[in-house]
Amino acid sequence: MIVSRSHLPGRIALTFVAACCMAASSGLAAQGRNGPAAQAGGSPPAAVPVQLGPSEFLNAALHIVAAVDRYEMGDIWDKSSPIMQASIARDRFVGNTAQQRAMLGAVSNREWRAIMRVVISPSDNGPLPPGRYMSIRFATAGQSGITMEEVVSFHLDTDGQWKLAGYTINRTS
């Protein structure tokens, strides 16, 4: 998931671009100025101007969790932010995520629980680099009877694009 921004007088214009980690047969709808714009399967998504809000991040997160459901963890890591790539090796992310996801089985229900915006300042001295983050939490139930929490996080990178900064899946029941 990538989102870039450019400054215009008096406001910020944002551009929403879907990551290529979606299956070639799946289309992506992004909300633009003139309403929804869908991409034909197999063609790379075009940039669509939007005013980014919680629903756009939720939609982007839904595309990430759908890619996890298809076990496309390698593609997800390949398109992620340098922050995510520096925090976990590709093989470890793919293996750990696939192992956790396999416990869930087929998804019977997935509901978003929270959309959080976090700004980390340089003085915070925490584990994450300073910057702007958006995180979306899901409660996901599997046909196995297990419920898991999925968290998809995005970071506004130094290149002005929002990119995937983290994905976690943990058992809650």
Image: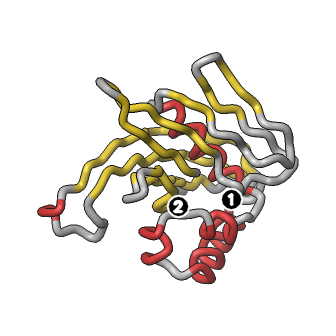
Count the marks. 2
**Mark 1 and 2 residues: CB-CB less than 8 Å, in contact?**
yes
* Residue type at the position of mark 2: Tyr
Q: 47 and 53: which one is in front?
A: 47
Residue 66: x %, y % from top left: 70, 50
| Relative image position of residue 95 (x, y in whole percent) | 65, 79
Residue 47 versus residue 123 in the image, above or below: above
In-image side of 2 versus 68 (left or right): left
Image quarter in which the C terminus is found: bottom right
Q: Is residue 56 left or right of residue 105?
A: left
Name the residue: 62% across, 33% down.
48
Q: Which labelled disc corresponds to residue 105?
A: none
The reply, left or right, for residue 128 in relation to residue 70 is left
Measuring from the top left, give residue 25's x and y in whole percent: 87, 48
Q: Is 76 located above or below residue 136 in the figure? A: below
Q: Amino acid at mark 1?
A: Val
Q: Is residue 90 above or below residue 32?
A: below
Secondary element at tag 1: helix
Q: Which residue is mark 1?
A: 68
Instruction: Please name the residue shown 12% across and 63% down the image.
Output: 123
Mark 1 / mark 2, whichever is N-terminal: 1
For the question of whether residue 170 can be seen, the reply is: no
Which sits in the foreground, 96 or 77? Answer: 77
Q: Which mark is residue 167?
A: 2
The answer to whether any part of residue 156 appears in the image is: yes
Q: Secondary structure at mark 2?
A: strand
Residue at horizontal 64 percent and vertical 75 percent from the top: 94
Identify the residue at image location x=37%, y=30%: 8
